Image (cartoon, grey):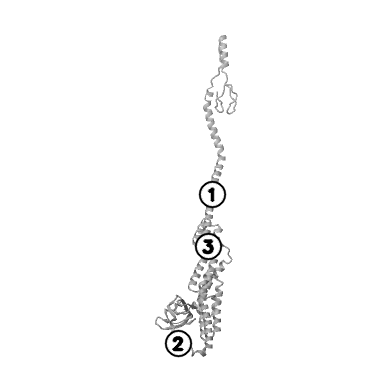
Amino acid sequence: MFCNQCGEKLAADSRFCTKCGAPVARPKEEMKDGNGSGQAAADESLSKKHTYPIDEANMDTPVNGAESRSERKRTTFKSALPFALPLVSILIAAIGLSYYYFQEKEVNAEVLGIMKSAEETALKGDYEASKKLLEEGISKRPEYTALKGNLDLVNLALELEGILDTASSKIKKTEFNAASKGLASLKSKINDSESPLFEPFKAKVEEKEVQIAVGTIKKELNGLKTVDELAGKLSILATLPEKEATPVKTEILNKIIQISTDDAEGKLKGKQFTDAFSIIDKGLEYATNDKKLLAFRDRVEQERSAFEQAEQQRIEQAMEAAAQEDLKNRTAAVEVLGVTAEVDEYGDLYVTGEVKNTATASISSVTIYYSVYDADNSYITDGSVTVYPYYLEPGESGSFDDIYYGIYQDATVDIDNITWYLN
């Protein structure tokens, strides 16, 4: 027996379907007509109790139940379809939005990485490379204002770099005023900025300003003729970094020494010993413990003492004629071992040499008198220089050096005379 509703096979005495719960239709008994005996009646009675008519319609129930299930499935699908389509649309939209979100997130991360690389590159001084990176980032995120702001700063850095290059070129050409104006323009553009991007420019501006100050002083040196003028430049150099100022400071000190010895020499020739001392002492205020100035001061002291003694002994000169003749015979007490004259790239003549005491006694205040000639052996100038150390024991050697500024040509030096004192 099968369920007429779902086609499920049922027990013979079932009243309801165990699967779908539908009531079970019971088959009608078929009654038989006949005139039998008691046994026939009994058999008929048994037949009534245990025999049911075969319902051909019920025999087709399993097939009809399967069809019913398929139909119900189609009906269920059709009824669910109106609800499924919106859900599918929502799902597709969610997937699309998720893809767009993650793609945009990836682009954002890429742009942030580009901006960071651009900042690092700019801080290293490679502004062109930084600019290219920022332009790449802007092409991906045109609305990102931070990128545009950084690009403006990098463009300004490129402009400042050009101003610095121009200033450097002007400095090399000793066009210091033009270079100063360029640096002033640069400073006005970055003074109010706190961006670390411009810190290197501030340092470079200071460096260029030092170069201008040093270059200006060096350019003026040839026109400075007094110790006071040179001392004023030393005061300016004292405010500048030692590394840049030292070469020019050394040149100024050498010139102070030269001017001091030249001026003192003039006073010494006029026997103005006090003035000579004053000049040398003033030079020593700037060129402290300079060997040449100290040797010259000893010479002034020696000549002053010699002069005073000579005045006292003037009366005895006649008696000392023989001794003077003997001194005259010992003019070979000083031997010149060598003398050189070189003109440097600035046109200044450096005279150096070495002498030796060939006497049997110590000598002092050895002075070399020389003349300077050009390549055609034409006279240019003359001068004198004191040998140091001041005292020379027998067999000892001493050195001398002198400077003439502004010769601007090859020159030679001839020793004219040498004087000394015997101790």
Give whichever of discs 2 and 3 has the lower sequence position. Answer: 3
Circle 1/circle 2 CB separation < 8 Å: no
- Mark 2, mark 3: which one is toward the viewer? 2
The residue lying at 57 percent from left, 9 percent from top is 38
Mark 3 surroundings within 10 Å by alpha-carbon count, few (fewer than 14), some (14 through 19), many (20 or more): many
The residue lying at 54 percent from left, 60 percent from top is 150
Q: Residue furthest top?
A: 37
Position of residue 198 relative to residue 383, above or below, is: above
Q: Find disc 2 in the rendering and name its residue.
A: 325
The residue lying at 48 percent from left, 72 percent from top is 172
Circle 2/circle 3 CB separation < 8 Å: no
Q: Distance from label 2 to label 3 (Cα)?
A: 86 Å
Q: Position of residue 412 (x, y in %)?
A: 42, 80
Residue 415 picture quarter: bottom left
Give whichever of discs 1 and 2 has the lower sequence position. Answer: 1
Position of residue 280 relative to residue 3, above or below, is: below
Please state which of residues 406 and 197 is positioned toward the viewer in this rendering: 406
Q: Find disc 3 in the rendering and name its residue.
A: 154
Residue type at tag 1: Phe
Left or right, 44 with reference to 409:
right
Q: Distance from label 1 to label 2 (Cα)?
A: 113 Å
- Mark 1, mark 2: which one is toward the viewer? 2
Give whichever of discs 3 and 1 has the lower sequence position. Answer: 1
Q: Position of residue 99 (x, y in %)?
A: 53, 48
Question: Does residue 256 appear in this view?
Answer: no
- Mark 3, mark 1: which one is toward the viewer? 3
Mark 1 surroundings within 10 Å by alpha-carbon count, few (fewer than 14), some (14 through 19), many (20 or more): few
Residue type at tag 3: Val
Residue type at tag 2: Glu
Q: Position of residue 143 (x, y in %)?
A: 55, 57
Q: Find disc 1 in the rendering and name its residue.
A: 102
